[in-house]
Amino acid sequence: MTKPASGMAVPGAAALLLLLLVGAAAGCGYQSCPPTRPGLLNVHLVPHTHDDVGWLKTVEQYFYGVRNEVQHAGVQYILDSVVAQLVADPSRRFIYAEVAFLARWWRQQDEATRRTVRQLVEQGRLEFVGGGWCMSDEAAAHYGPAIEQLALGRRFLRREFGACGTPRVAWQIDPFGHSRQLAAIFAQMGYDGLFVGRVDHQDKATREGLREMELLWRASESLSPPAADLFTGILPNVYNPPSGFCWDQLCSDPPVVDEDSEENNVDSIVSTFLQIAASQAERYRTNHIIMTMGSDFQYENANLWFKNMDKLIAHVNARVPENGRLLPLRGRPPPVLDGLFHQPTCLQALRTPQQQLSPGEAVAVAQHHDAVTGTEKQHVADDYARQLAAGWESCQLLVANALASLGGSKENFVFCNALNVSVCPLTEAAGRFTVILYNPLGRQVSWPIRLPVNGASYAVTDPQGQPVPSEVVPVSNFTRRLRGDGGSAVRELLFQASAPPLGFSTFTVSRLSRGDPRAHPARTPVVSQPREIQNEHVRVLFDPLTGLLKEIQDLDKSISLPVFQSFYWYNASVGNDESSQASGAYIFRPNSSEPFPVSGSKRVSAHLVKNALVQEVHQNFSSWCSQVVRLRAGQPYVELEWTVGPIPVADGWGKEIISRFETTLQTDARFYTDSNGRQILERRRDYRPTWNLSQTEPVAGNYYPVNSRIFIKDKKFQLTVLTDRSQGGSSIFDGSLELMVHRRLLYDDNRGVGEPLVELGANKQGLVVRGRHLVLLDTVESAANRHRLLAQELFMAPYAVLAPGGGPSYRRGQPRVRQFSGLRRELPPNVHLLTLTPWDAGALLLRLEHQFERGESANGSQPVTVDLLNLFSAFTIVSVQEMSLGADLPLDATSRLVWTPATGLAQPRPVPKLDPSRITLQPMEIRTFLATVQYEVPGAGPGGP
Amino acid sequence: MTKPASGMAVPGAAALLLLLLVGAAAGCGYQSCPPTRPGLLNVHLVPHTHDDVGWLKTVEQYFYGVRNEVQHAGVQYILDSVVAQLVADPSRRFIYAEVAFLARWWRQQDEATRRTVRQLVEQGRLEFVGGGWCMSDEAAAHYGPAIEQLALGRRFLRREFGACGTPRVAWQIDPFGHSRQLAAIFAQMGYDGLFVGRVDHQDKATREGLREMELLWRASESLSPPAADLFTGILPNVYNPPSGFCWDQLCSDPPVVDEDSEENNVDSIVSTFLQIAASQAERYRTNHIIMTMGSDFQYENANLWFKNMDKLIAHVNARVPENGRLLPLRGRPPPVLDGLFHQPTCLQALRTPQQQLSPGEAVAVAQHHDAVTGTEKQHVADDYARQLAAGWESCQLLVANALASLGGSKENFVFCNALNVSVCPLTEAAGRFTVILYNPLGRQVSWPIRLPVNGASYAVTDPQGQPVPSEVVPVSNFTRRLRGDGGSAVRELLFQASAPPLGFSTFTVSRLSRGDPRAHPARTPVVSQPREIQNEHVRVLFDPLTGLLKEIQDLDKSISLPVFQSFYWYNASVGNDESSQASGAYIFRPNSSEPFPVSGSKRVSAHLVKNALVQEVHQNFSSWCSQVVRLRAGQPYVELEWTVGPIPVADGWGKEIISRFETTLQTDARFYTDSNGRQILERRRDYRPTWNLSQTEPVAGNYYPVNSRIFIKDKKFQLTVLTDRSQGGSSIFDGSLELMVHRRLLYDDNRGVGEPLVELGANKQGLVVRGRHLVLLDTVESAANRHRLLAQELFMAPYAVLAPGGGPSYRRGQPRVRQFSGLRRELPPNVHLLTLTPWDAGALLLRLEHQFERGESANGSQPVTVDLLNLFSAFTIVSVQEMSLGADLPLDATSRLVWTPATGLAQPRPVPKLDPSRITLQPMEIRTFLATVQYEVPGAGPGGP
């Protein structure tokens, strides 16, 4: 029995009472709930619309209702209509989820309409659920942007609607699977529950039989219950109305005709409804069941829905007296589910690059479950890219302003966004320029700089004017092919730069004239079919016959592990005898469990490029697949930079490309993946923790989302692969792990998008993707110490801003600031500065997190204490208030329903008095603070929200 | 220049000003018009919805929005939504036409909503156009029901909305052609103008070039101008919005996006609109043009339309100052069009039987332009039939009650509706029964009674108990085949009955026992291949070789005319090189101008059945086509009763069956058809009076609607064929005329209905149709004297009600009334009692018409005077008020705009003081009276509306 704290009675038997949240509204939230009847089955009709923040159309097209020939959908009209219909009848209720659209619409409204809507919210007639900027994806979203997009939406709701605007339930009705980390986030934001729509059909069938459609999800091993416990309800019919009861303009179900007419159907409609309700009640354990009355972009003409629901309610409730004792209901405590709330057996392709700076609305939009997943139409994907680019441009402006302000000079900052293909007009042409390395992390970083140049030799100096070792290497053939006509550099300048925590360092680069004593000729010894590369920490061995990686050694810990790595492609299914399902944007379905090697001969041509800073083995797997295996001086991991595409499909075969690692580790069918880049979850091949799996897809059914890392281990050693983006990954046989790096498919998979994932670039060829895998070999005990920090460094990577150099100083008489740190000292290794962003005037929002799970590291997993007051250099904290994770509510004002699960009641701990000088973080804890600050440096204040 | 009486200025040049009837509403009607700007082009955006009273769905399905998978349309929601949107913004306007739906919706509404709607009407924000119960058809509708359905709608509007509810313009935007008689009706109902949507494309192109899209239609030769003059505007785009400006949920045109968005399109939308307006203005002569903003079943979500129109208006009007001198406009008087407003070159099949009693809502509904035309889906046609049957049943009840009341006896009246196939259980079984002949006409009639019986001999007595001659004949094989298992009679009883004006006569029928002296054996001499039949007025000659009719002689006037008559079928086109157009529900298109004879051998088997009352030649053209050529004693016309169907289509050829008459008359390409059963219009083959016709369809392009009659003539003689239903007819070569009696087609003609006209009956075979053509041969001078009266007798035919006989008398001591006349004397031959119906309590609505046109008969076409006060026997007229034709307005309260056409101003005559004892009717005049009455016979009063 899921049981709210208020002590709802356990029913014995129930008749049918139909309730649409009707009743004299005494306020918003639970106060606005209609009176229920304990002895009856209470059917809660929940009118809602599901408004994708981009899918078959772009966000703007959806909002305005442009391109209705693609899909009839116009959110401006939906909100117009729902508000009008709520105003028309005080007994009507509606829930709304997507704040991206609500905020867009809000801007259109005059003050009178806003007042009306505020009143509807205050009276509980319009209620917000979810309340994020979008309904974020769960599989491919990183926890940082996932939090930010929720906070962005919740902040809007709080600001415009006050306490009544605060959503009470999370509403993840369309994402294609559900993640533990996101559940933990919802709990910490104060949501009382979570409703989900899409669940593996085997899981759902099992739960229906056991009446376990509602459960308490313990979403964290590290946080003390009930901090991450979340009531979770699986909706009966995804998020659609019962069959035959869809009264939207987009549906064709007959309306209720209860007047004198040959079309009168009220008796048959009521009977059908009672049957459906009784059948649904058999799958749920309490005498309260939910029906979602709405679907995709419905309620554009809300009158249709409400007029017919009003009639349905009246006619069904009129039958109540005759219907007594409809359902015998059982009452026993609910199970507690410890594991992940299950992935679908399919995995979505991942197309949208992760955004790495502070998220704005564009980044929030990109978290949408049809955006980051790649299940949108191509023109919509292009629009997301355009929006992200626009968002990134405004980010650049913010960074430039901040750098100018902090550095005290009016530089013409240049952002070279194509450095990964060695294109940057400034560095290609200039004889002298500066490189400002910006570091958003709370720890100092050392970061490799690689810039396209045309000179033969350069002098690099650090902020203090000291020389920094540098090298010049030829641009690789892989990169030349990739950049096409986009750049002219023949060489790349390499140097290792470092930057202080939450700060920047400025490096000066000058081309050396021939004969300059500091110039040393570009030494680029090239060795064919190399046998090994090695730095002070790691040795990597290659098979000279095949050119492939064969062993990794950790020299510090004297570990040696055979590791064979190569690229393969799964042949995409076009449907077969078992199922007509093709592999597509939504569904990964290979037609065989055996992938083909990309290098048909199983040999690759390889050569070594080596200098004092870096050693690289360049492997050419085929004309469209290559890889650089790289070791830099001082780095304790191996970097694999792969370049894949355009995937050839002229043979008529869709292809899904993987990088597979094979080792001798005894892994016992187990492997480990992160949940939204944060928690680590154990996966077992051909197994689900809560039901007896019937596995029909031996490859795809074992694929899981990898946002930041995947690893395998035996009792002693662990091989971890960090990714620079979300990918699908698995371990198809013991000792192996694999990651899907690219896909190109020729058939639509019939889930709505209506396009094959064949993506053409500007040159009308398939897309080329370049990415990185960082491979860590370590002992099981100490692996987390490395992968936790390295993953954070990969996600919140330092960024190099360029400038011609020599701009005038802002502040007369003061030298330019060439190095700056916003922190007075580095944060401890297990603390991550998740958020630091201007809030209201004079205030900053700050999130600190403990980035280790309980028990994964002897030192890292210890509680850690930080002195907030003495932490920042740029400002002084005047006062500080601890907030809930969503930042919209003071922590001590947050209250959640308390549930009593089978494992016993866990009472929430009272919020202790805040001592900002001693902020203690427990493993996996995120704490959120709103700080009023005073700035030390004039003019360096935040710009406001 | 069309020019209203108020003296609207003739513009010289104009810029563009966009007006959506916006402005401070000072009242309804023209008072609510927005201020115009004389120097500018004033574009009137007219928001409207076109709601077919049945088409692809039934009336009820359309109203509720049932079966939206067939067509998305729900009128209840349209009216809900429009009202809400009008309320939301006082600057918005809407027009509505179809009262059948409005009245249905009105019943649903609470008093508050009704008050709101009344207010909208009073403020001119909601305005009614057309205002009939439906938008009637023009080609196939008879003027009687056409008037009644308009009056029914107008009465509702007047009752619920008062003066502001009165429609000012007729709105015939979808019918497939326009009739002169209906235009005359509109004028006499007080409409100021008529808007039409569908005009022959050649006509329209000519008018666009000449700027004659607006004209003054002189809709009667008989009525003195301007009584039947009607301003007529041809809409620019049928009734649709300009291309790209359809903002309904059923359309996909982009909305106006005028905010900061990548979808912003306001400049391009405004530019396109200005181009369209300028281009349209070139086709109209004044600086006021209309754009119809709406279409079929649009405005279900009126917000979409209004929100975008509001934006369009704002942005276009904002450009006015920059757009000066856009259009040079010409100013000269408009032409006056004397002829018919042109038919389309296609003719619709006619499936719905004419209703012959006083029309209720079902009959009004059946006048709809997709009902009587047969362009609806089959299931909708079935629904119309069901509605008419239900309406007919309530009619029967009214008739039965009236008969019982007037006759003073409680009889169990029986209505045998299948007498035309000789089925009537009462007469088949009973040894004794009574026949009450009801006569709705204002003159005594003599009417042939033909009843299925099984006895060999019967005695018939008239109301006075005098014997009436009768005959018994075998049921013909044609009829036996047609009735199938539906009846058991082996014989038919024939006698000639007469009934007094507006009254009834009761006849008693008794089966005679064998040996009864009055019994005479059934004499049915059968003669094969007869040569002639003859009564006292007419002789009909047959060709004994072919069995076909070959000559008709009028013995009274010694006229003899060779007349060859036979049946043919046109092979329906399935599309050809010239056009892919197939023949279908909307379009008649034979694939050749030469029809095939139904009797392939051109011979028919024929035999004669003859007795004292009737002579019949039975012709068998094929297994599915037969005809009885009939002469009854005393009748001056030949009756052709044809039975056609099921039309065989197993050969894959659609067929359209005609009856063709060939004569030796020199007709000079001319023939004559009625307009809605009233005016007669001259037609010329391959000719249109107002444009230079390019004839592409030599047969179909010469077909015209025939509602009641078609004739050909030379200088002396006229051959007239009267029809018992609306049919298509023509004269394809000189001396001939033809009527289409049945059609069966295998292909949809792609005009929306989506079904071939292949009609299956209950037995899953094609339909069988039985009908009558009455053929009159006369001199040109006196032809009208016969066809005017006979056509009226055919349309308002007497009806035989049956009863077992012997019911008790109502009034103790009083004998039953066996004969009754509502009139004290017959009406003069040229006066027709069009309407006599209960109105409000104690009041009757009365319409008298002069049924001759000016000049068509020496006597008949004279003005005629009637004494109303002394006319009726059942009641005394206490007071009487003359009304406009629609009966919703006193005649002296009716005012219409006065136009000055090229032929000079015609001022309406002032309404003279009414003298009810001297009601003079001019040719073609219809006068409408509301009379307060007192009943002579207790209990025989009207039942109220």
Image (spheres, coloured by chain):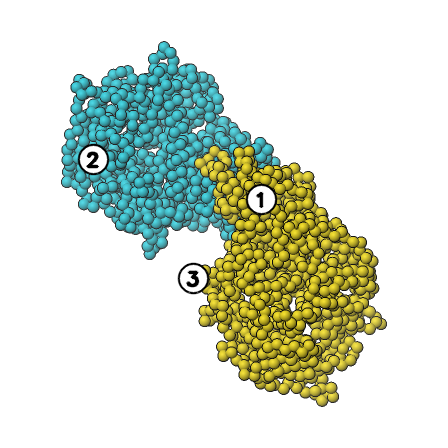
Chain colours: A cyan, B yellow
Residue for point 20% across, 37% down: A619
Mark 3 neighbour density, 10 Å: few (under 14) some (14–19) many (20 or more): few
Q: Residue B389 appears in which quarter of the rendering?
A: bottom right
Residue B496 image point, x, y percent? 71, 77
Residue for point 80% across, 62% down: B867
Are discs 1 and 2 both within one chain?
Answer: no
Q: Which one is in front in this view, the residue at disc 1 or the one at disc 3?
A: 1
In the image, B463: left or right of A62?
right
Residue B525 image point, x, y percent? 63, 86
In the image, A533: left or right of B516?
left
CA gap between label 1 and label 3 equals 42 Å
Residue underneath mark 2: A618
Residue for point 42% across, 38% down: A368
CA gap between label 2 and label 3 equals 67 Å
Residue underneath mark 1: B330
Q: Which one is in front in this view, the residue at disc 1 or the one at disc 2?
A: 1
Query: Label 3 near label 1: C-beta < 8 Å?
Result: no
Which kind of residue does numbered mark 1 sit on? Answer: Arg
Are discs 2 and 3 both within one chain?
Answer: no
Q: Secondary structure under badge 1?
A: loop
Q: Is residue A537 visible?
A: no
Which kind of residue does numbered mark 2 sit on? Answer: His
In the image, A745: left or right of A840?
left
Residue underneath mark 3: B577
Residue B621 image point, x, y percent? 54, 77
Mark 1 neighbour density, 10 Å: few (under 14) some (14–19) many (20 or more): some
Residue A566 image point, x, y percent? 23, 41
In the rendered view, tell whether residue B97 sits above or below residue A335. Answer: below
Chain of the residue that carries numbered disc 3 in the rendered image: B
Q: Residue B814 appears in which quarter of the rendering?
A: bottom right
